[in-house]
Amino acid sequence: MQEHREDHEHLGNLQEIIAALQEPSLYPHPTKDIKIITTAVSHVFLTGNFAYKINKALNLGFLDFSTLEKRKEQCEKELKHNSLLSPELYEDVIPILKDDHGKIILTGQGEVIEYALKMKQMNPDSTMNNLLKDKMITEKQITLLAEQIFQFHQIAPQDKEIRQFGSVTTIQFNWDENFSQTEKYKPKIIASEDFNFIQEKINDFIIKNNVLFNTRVANKKIKHCHGDFHSANVFIDNNKIFIFDGIVFNKRFPCSDIIAEIAFMAMDLEFHHREDLAAHFIQRYQQLSNDTDIPALLDFYKCYRAYIRAKIHCFTTEDKNLNAQEKQKTTAAAQSYFQLAKKYAANLD
């Protein structure tokens, strides 16, 4: 009963909070037109100079924001981890309060009813994926991107627990999960023969490269990376790079070999038909890192990243809120990612 009361109370608070955060008078700084971006797990309020992100009270199994304390912890982890990537972008964790008169406030005295992550607001159109569509990404910017992610990898957290995520057992588990979760999409979204081909090539590669994977763990190449390092999570402001939205809610997603991280961006650039920029990005990162294992593992991890993007699009096709056109577009994207995964699998020895 207590849990149901808390849920009901939170829903009531949430509606009030969403309404309050759209009021310019709430903020201790000037605002412009306030806009809301709603994602699967959060609401982001764009106020002009600053953005405020609140997390939804969800428990999806792999992610648990069901209590106020857990949402506070998520905000604090996000601030700490993402500040390693883009310290200029991430500002603070702000308590949202309700005063004695029942009014929602951001400063002063009152009961804490929610927490928000405060960030510097960037132009939403300046994300790298938008700039790629408009062919506005330069080699210089890609060089800076490689340098910034390399610098982050030098300070990214690593310990014994994190290193376990690079073990052959975990790698195999992640792939087995991918295959079991996408089996039902054959032959409609992925041809059965393509599914079988990718599965065979991947499983064979893991067996053959057992020693290499173990060596990567021993050499401390497994770190708490960004975890979702693709062009939609990078702002580019002239020649300033801001990497944002690193994953902190579940260690299995971001804790990986650093090659799996750079493979994500390389795959994403190739998905946008910019093989030239992907090659430049990898070349610059390899120069900086002197990591001689990159050629051996890059296609394996590019395949992994493309397959996961395909899988997510498959899941999205089942969203009842999609209209026929959106569903068709999402299905086509899933098919494109599966084709890319097949291409990378074909390169594996």
Image (cartoon, helix red, strand yellow):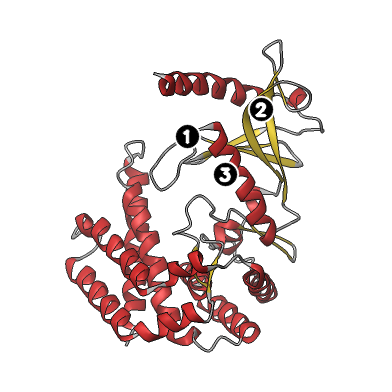
Q: Amino acid at mark 3?
A: Gln
Residue 260's spot in the image, x, y percent?
47, 72
Determine whether 154 is above or below 43 in the image.
below
Instruction: Check disc 1: other Cα within 10 Å, few if <14, some if 14-19, many if 20+.
Output: some
Label 2, label 3: how many angstroms apart (C-alpha)?
Answer: 20 Å
Locate the C terminus by quadrant: bottom left
Q: Amino acid at mark 1?
A: Ser
Q: Residue at x 49, y 22 (%)?
A: 11
Q: Is residue 43 visible?
A: no
Name the mark nearer the viewer: 2 or 1.
Answer: 1
Residue, disc 3: 74
Residue, disc 2: 21
For this view, does 208 lie left or right of residue 196? right
In this view, the residue in front, 147 or 132, is 147
Q: Which mark identifies residue 66?
A: 1
Residue 231's spot in the image, x, y percent?
56, 62
The answer to which image quadrant residue 19 occupies is top right
Q: Amino acid at mark 2?
A: Leu
